[in-house]
Amino acid sequence: MIPKPIGRFAPSPTHHLHLGSLTTAVASFCHIKSLGGEWLLRIEDVDFERCRPEYTDSILHDLNKLGLHWDGEVVYQSERTDIYNDFLSDKLSDLTYACQCSRKQLDAHRNHIAEPHALNQPILYPRFCLHKNLDKSHPKSKLRLQLPNVVTAFVDGLQGVIWDNPALSLGDVVVKRQNQMINYILACAIDDGLQNITHIMRGLDIMPMTVSQIDILHKCRLPTPSYFYHLPLLMNSDGQKLSKQNLATPIDTKQPSETLIYALKLLGQRTTEEMRGAKPHEILNHAVEHWDNSPLKQRHTLAVI
């Protein structure tokens, strides 16, 4: 049997929703609903240093005001730490090792690398601790995951065929910090598998993690999403990605219909004059019925209108 399409929106509550995250929410909702699927909501609040309950409340409020109603219960990653730790101690145990390198040590290493690096090419962790057999439970230890040194590809529904070698692009990533915080790359992958997500539509900035997350799912013996769509990034007038780091303005849901129409226009979707007097659910019904990925294909950026 063909599995029921299941998509998700997974915001991190480190700030309010801004226009960039809103377009992701609208696109993922309309796309999965156009396929007759379910749209789940997952609050990715594993970062207990930056995530705030008031931002979570704000996100839920804004989604409801805009008619972006999710299916089922909201999943909170902050309540699932034991699940991630179980996978680390079981399925991923042989691929993880303790690392006690300080930031000062790693900065010194980066400053003394002999060979030049290409622009934007990351400086990978030099595996100082790989063979030390350090205690994983030591208070000074963080956990690193060894990613495969294999060139692998996946088909992206918007960006085409994407090739990557995780060992060379990311290296041995930290999956659990010294303060016991689980990192995004692990928690996101495990939850996508446990929630049986079939379709992932998210920002292009996450695409470099995709092959690694697919590998994590395979190692954890969890189902892998069948379809990926990495959306072009929304850029401001200065050519910067709209993000919390760039102090993107929170969306205003006092006029939800106008906000939805604006988001749909940014996504290149069909809008009509009749929409201006419509309610949010009517606008979304129209958008779902006429959803079209074509305006988003082979594009890396979208400009704010």
Image (cartoon, grey):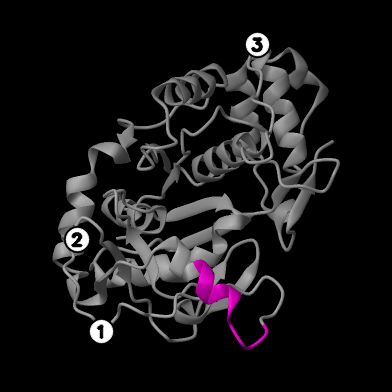
Foreground of the two, 173 or 198: 173
In this rendering, position of residue 185 left or right of residue 293: left
Report the mark closest to the observer, 1 or 2: 1
The answer to whether one can see residue 2 in this image is: no
Q: CA distance from mark 1 to mark 2?
A: 22 Å
Q: Residues within 10 Å of mark 1 (few under 14, many from 20)?
A: few
Q: Amino acid at mark 2?
A: Phe
SS at mark 2?
helix
In this rendering, position of residue 115 left or right of residue 187: right
Q: Position of residue 47 (x, y in %)?
A: 39, 42
Q: Position of residue 80 (x, y in %)?
A: 23, 43
**Residue matched to label 3:** 254
Q: Amino acid at mark 3?
A: Lys
Q: Is residue 111 magenta?
A: yes
Q: Are marks 1 and 3 in contact (CB under 8 Å)?
A: no
Mark toward the start of the polypeptide (3 vs 2): 2
Foreground of the two, 300 or 182: 182
Name which residue lies at 38% across and 76% down: 147
Residue 87, disc: 2
Report the mark closest to the observer, 1 or 3: 1
Q: Are marks 1 and 2 in contact (CB under 8 Å)?
A: no
Residue 126 in the image: above or below residue 84: below
In this rendering, position of residue 59 left or right of residue 148: right
Mark toward the start of the polypeptide (1 vs 2): 2
Q: Quadrant of residue 219?
A: bottom left
Q: Are marks 3 and 2 in contact (CB under 8 Å)?
A: no
The range drawn in magenta is 107-116
SS at mark 1?
loop
**Residue matched to label 1:** 131
Q: Residues within 10 Å of mark 3 (few under 14, many from 20)?
A: few
